Image: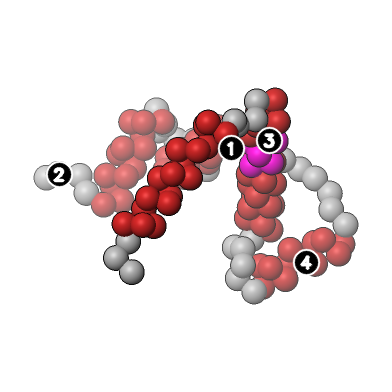
Amino acid sequence: MPVRGREWALYSVRGVCGLSQGLLGNPLLDCIAFRYAECMAQLVTRIDTDLAKGIDQLVAEGVVESRSDAVRKGLQALIEQTRRRRTAEAIISGYTLHPQGEDEVAWADRATVQMIAEEPW
């Protein structure tokens, strides 16, 4: 009889993680905890009470699932915002050092005028 459901999950986890009996006494939970700790960095920080209250309000409103989720999303947003700012600064710097000449943009102006002229208004 083939192994199915929860038994299949335990069978698979034992094979993948090489566990028979671990810290939690359940191979599935031990493997999940082990893999989670292995794959995720943990940060510990202190925040002021007003910020904590603001985070708790976001959790209560369902904006985020938990305090950890709020911190994760906040850090992701900060990293993305910084990445975009750096990209914009690089583009601006490139155009500042090497501005486009009239010959480089004239084709776009001609193409725009032609597309408008071809429209069956």
Compared to residue 114, the image places residue 101 above or below, namely: above
Q: CA distance from mark 3 to mark 1?
A: 36 Å
Residue bearing mark 3: 92
Residue 54 circle label: 4
How far across and down, in percent of the image, does residue 93 sit?
70, 30
Q: Position of residue 111 (x, y in %)?
A: 40, 45
Q: Assign a secondary structure to mark 2.
A: loop
Residue 121 versus residue 14: which sits nearer the camera?
121
Of badges 4 and 2, nearer the viewer stands: 4
Helix, strand or loop status at disc 4: helix
- Per the image, label 3 sits on a secondary structure element best described as helix
Q: Disc 4 or 3, which lies upstream in sequence?
A: 4
Amino acid at dot 3: Ile
Q: Earlier in the sequence, mark 3 or mark 2?
A: 2
Please determine whether, in this image, residue 30 is positioned above or below residue 71. above
Residue at the far left: name it. 1
- Residue 59 sits in quarter: bottom right
Magenta residues span 84-89
Label 3 or label 1, whichever lies nearer to me, is: 3
**Viewer-side residue, 64 vs 96:** 96
> Left or right of 27: which side holds 38?
right
> Circle 1 sits in a helix, a strand or a loop, which is it?
loop
Can residue 49 be seen here? The reply is yes
